[in-house]
Amino acid sequence: MVVTYLIGADTRAPLIAVHATCRAGNAWAELSLTQAAQLVERLRGLLDQAAGEAGGDDD
């Protein structure tokens, strides 16, 4: 399970908080908008790779 939310303040740059839970445990991070965009791209690549290995075109 992954939960994300926006942390914002009027005087500071906004951050994206990411909380992830899996069989290995729990983790969290506060990411800049640039880092969050990079994470999205990496996850999109993993999804594309997994779909290709499964032989399906499901979105």
Image (cartoon, rainbow, N blue to C red):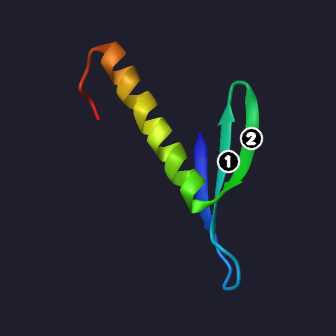
2 and 1 marks in contact (CB < 8 Å) = yes
Residue 18: x %, y % from top left: 64, 51
Residue occupying the point 56% across, 53% down? 36
Residue occupying the point 66% across, 41% down? 20
Front-most of residues 2 and 29: 29
Q: Residues within 10 Å of mark 1 (few under 14, many from 20)?
A: some
Q: Amino acid at mark 2?
A: Ala
Secondary element at tag 2? strand
Residue occupying the point 29% across, 35% down? 59
19, above or below 55, in the image:
below
Q: Residue beneath label 1, please? A: 19
Front-most of residues 8 and 1: 8
Residue 41: x %, y % from top left: 45, 42
Compared across the picture, whether 40 is left or right of 18 comes to left
Q: Which mark is residue 5?
A: none
Q: Residue beneath label 2, please? A: 27
Residue 8: x %, y % from top left: 65, 75
Secondary element at tag 1? strand
- In the rendered image, which quarter contains the N terminus? top right
Compared across the picture, whether 17 is left or right of 58 comes to right
Residue occupying the point 75% across, 37% down? 26
Q: Can you tell which quarter of the image residue 17 is in?
A: bottom right
Residue 54: x %, y % from top left: 33, 15
Compared across the picture, whether 56 is left or right of 41 comes to left
30, above or below 11, in the image:
above
Q: Rounded to the nearest whole Å, what is the CA distance between mark 2 and mark 1?
A: 6 Å
4, above or below 50, in the image:
below
Q: Amino acid at mark 1?
A: His
